[in-house]
Image (cartoon, grey):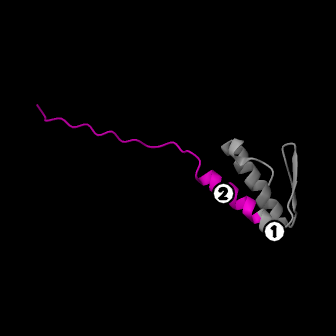
Amino acid sequence: MNIDIQILSQEERKALLKELLEARFSGVKRVKFDDRDVEFKSDDEMKTAIKDLQDSISTSPKRRNVVVASFSSGF
């Protein structure tokens, strides 16, 4: 795939993933995203692109929950 997924926002990645999944399961090998037109040579190539996108979405930085404990002696 000729799109550098690292420069895409989280929302753009999710939109591209949705487009790829819809295309793959409908049998289409050409996907248009923004101003790019990508044609996959095989289902395996498309499956790899989908996996890469899923991995990048699941490993992107997420907001962390922080718990701060405070103790006192009671005096």
Residue at point 84% right, 43% down? Answer: 34
Q: Give the number of the disc on residue 21.
A: none
Instruction: Point out the tag, 1 or 2, that comes first from the N-terminus.
Output: 1
Q: What residue type is disc 2 on?
A: Gln
Q: Give the number of the disc on residue 54.
A: 2
Q: Residue beneath label 1, please? A: 43
Residue at point 85% right, 61% down? Answer: 40
* Picture quarter with the C terminus: top left
Q: Residue 43: x and y, percent?
A: 81, 68
The stretch in magenta equals: 47-75
Residue at point 78% right, 58% down? Answer: 20
Relative to the observer, which residue lies in front, 7 or 23?
7
Residue neighbourhood size for the residue with mark 1, other residues' Cα within 10 Å, grouped as few (<14), some (14–19), many (≥20): some
Could you tell me if the residues under marks 1 and 2 are in contact, i.e. CB atoms within 8 Å?
A: no
Q: Residue 17: x and y, percent?
A: 73, 54
Residue at point 13% right, 34% down? Answer: 74
Q: Residue 67: x and y, percent?
A: 36, 42
Residue 52 on the magenta segment: yes
